[in-house]
Image: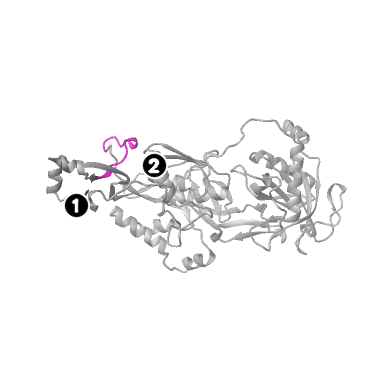
């Protein structure tokens, strides 16, 4: 009876003495994936890469969809450009990603903050429980058995094709960026004793001194590089060494000192053209604290015979600022200098003059503009008018970076900034991103933008958002996302506002201002 049914349905075909069956393409136009993925190759027409070893999103997507369900946790210990986190966010998976490179982490943060995802319809529409999954596309799977028995075709669920709500647009949810720091309280005396008895720290300092003599301290400009020709250790808990480098003629602050005063503490001044700097070396594994910087600054002020205090570290507390300190002997500059993580890999780092083992961290040049509360409207009492909350905006003008060769603080243009963020109510410990802005790009792109030419990427993103959300986006507010002035926010006296700037080199620095 079943064979008769197949014959009536034209599903049987005689080939010689052999009876075969007929299968049509629309019976089930799908097939399982095997171990050959020829659709994941990256080419010039594929997705744009933001990281040198960036994995194609389709590769991570397929692996995540095969091994996890919505709501599961995805762990990627090698973050890179954040492809795993990006894909996990798109497909409703929780994620944790880890990296030791600040450049990789900043690329991943920027990628997630600017990401736009399709809105997939949830299976649980009432309580919106993501763990119940999405509403997936289902296709009939017609088999000869179902035709012979006159049964309805079974359905197959395509877990890589959820139903999409075209009227909604989804962005990345809130996420935190955490660092591992040692919060165990240790007395300064114990730190000094540990430093003297730690032989490994001495070897580590030798590596630092060698690279300061070969590559020097860079400021991001090829012409601004302070290479030390001599470095001497110091028996000081706060100032660990003194170094000497050559500066341009006429840039030495010692010319402003009176001849009668001479060198402080009876020490002879270095020869003309040579300048002196004190070095404070932060922990090998840890963060440079503000207390350590304050102690080093006081020690440098007491000595009074150097124009530059260099704070070397792999990471810094957020409220440490580069600054100029005035003493009775003149001024000296305090500069944060980031040490490259490769310095921790003993034997792998070569002493190359082009190596960027030490890079100064620029201080953001910002202006807090506080606007007075709006004037009293008709019918509004004087008490209500006094209670009106004033607003403020933050404008970023660039980065101030110290040039040790010319002995001056130079202002870098805003094109050196990849993106910047604002915490409008900073508590002194946790930086919460309340506003984010993206103004990075090379100088030509930035000049075109300043001349008023249309930014195609900006315009395209705006049109797509307006089409999806069926709304008209405020031109001025949307333009601020790619500008250098924040959105207005309410302020009160004593409120702290923190601005975090990420440069094109991946350097991250924070400046805190008080209203």
Between circles 2 and 1, the one closer to the viewer is 1
Q: Where is residue 378 in the image (x, y as percent from the top left)?
A: 32, 50
Relative horizontal placement of residue 131, taking residue 78 as reference (left or right):
left
Relative to residue 171, is residue 219 drawn left or right? right
Residue 268 appears anywhere in the view: yes
| Magenta part of the chain | 125-139
Front residue of 462 and 276: 462
Q: Which of the two labelled residues, at mark 2 and mark 1, occupies the earlier sequence position?
A: 1
Extreme residue in the front direction? 17
What is the distance, in whole Å, between disc 2 and disc 1 at their CAs? 40 Å
Q: What residue is shown at x 70% (from left), y 45% (from top)?
A: 346
Disc 2 is placed on an element classified as helix
Residue 515 in sight from this viewpoint? no
Q: What element carries label 1?
A: strand
Q: Where is residue 187 in the image (x, y as percent from the top left)?
A: 70, 30
Q: Residue 425 location, x and y as percent?
A: 49, 42
Q: Mark 1 points at which residue?
A: 14
Which image quarter holds the N terminus? top left
Residue topped by disc 2: 66
């Amino acid at each position: 009876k079943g064979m008769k049914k197949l014959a009536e349905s034209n599903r049987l075909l005689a080939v010689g003495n052999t009876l075969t069956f007929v299968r049509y393409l629309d019976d089930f136009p799908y097939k399982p994936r095997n171990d050959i993925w020829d659709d994941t190759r990256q080419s010039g027409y594929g997705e744009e890469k933001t990281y040198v070893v960036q994995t194609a999103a389709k590769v991570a997507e397929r692996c995540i969809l095969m091994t996890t369900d919505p709501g599961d946790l995805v762990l990627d210990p090698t973050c890179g450009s954040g492809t795993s986190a990006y894909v996990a966010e798109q497909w409703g998976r929780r994620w944790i990603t880890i990296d030791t490179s600040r450049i990789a982490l900043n690329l991943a943060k920027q990628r997630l903050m600017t990401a736009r995802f399709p809105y997939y319809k949830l299976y649980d529409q009432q309580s919106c429980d993501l763990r119940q999954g999405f509403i997936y596309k289902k296709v009939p799977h017609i088999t000869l058995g179902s035709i012979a028995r006159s049964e309805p075709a079974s359905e197959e669920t395509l877990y890589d094709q959820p139903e999409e709500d075209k009227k909604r647009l989804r962005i990345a949810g809130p996420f935190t960026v955490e660092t591992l720091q040692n919060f165990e309280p240790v007395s300064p005396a114990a730190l000094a004793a540990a430093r003297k008895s730690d032989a490994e720290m001495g070897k580590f300092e030798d590596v630092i001194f060698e690279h300061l003599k070969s590559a020097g301290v860079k400021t991001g400009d090829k012409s601004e590089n302070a290479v030390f020709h001599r470095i001497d250790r110091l028996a000081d808990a706060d100032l660990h060494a003194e170094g000497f480098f050559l500066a341009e003629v006429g840039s030495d602050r010692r010319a402003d000192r009176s001849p009668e005063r001479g060198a402080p503490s009876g020490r002879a001044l270095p020869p003309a053209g040579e300048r002196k700097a004190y070095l404070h070396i932060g922990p090998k594994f840890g963060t440079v604290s503000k207390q350590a910087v304050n102690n080093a600054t006081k020690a440098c002020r007491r000595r009074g015979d150097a124009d530059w205090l260099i704070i070397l570290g792999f990471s810094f507390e957020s409220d440490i600022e580069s600054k100029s300190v005035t003493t009775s002997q003149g001024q000296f500059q305090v500069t944060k200098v980031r040490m490259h993580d490769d310095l921790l890999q003993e034997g792998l780092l070569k002493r190359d003059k082009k190596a960027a083992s030490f890079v100064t961290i620029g201080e953001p040049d910002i202006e807090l503009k506080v606007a007075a509360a709006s004037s009293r409207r008709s019918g509004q009492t004087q008490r209500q008018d006094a209670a009106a909350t004033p607003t403020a905006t933050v404008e970023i003008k660039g980065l101030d970076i110290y040039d040790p060769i010319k002995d001056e603080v130079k202002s870098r243009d805003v094109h050196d900034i990849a993106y910047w963020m604002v915490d409008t109510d900073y508590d002194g410990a946790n930086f919460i991103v309340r506003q984010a802005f993206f103004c990075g790009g090379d100088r030509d792109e930035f000049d075109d933008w300043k001349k008023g030419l249309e930014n195609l990427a900006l315009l395209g993103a705006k049109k797509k958002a307006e089409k999806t959300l069926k709304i008209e986006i405020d031109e001025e507010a949307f333009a601020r996302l790619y500008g250098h002035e924040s959105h207005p926010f309410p302020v009160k006296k004593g409120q702290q506002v923190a601005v975090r700037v990420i440069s094109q080199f991946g350097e991250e620095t924070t400046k805190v201002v008080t209203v």
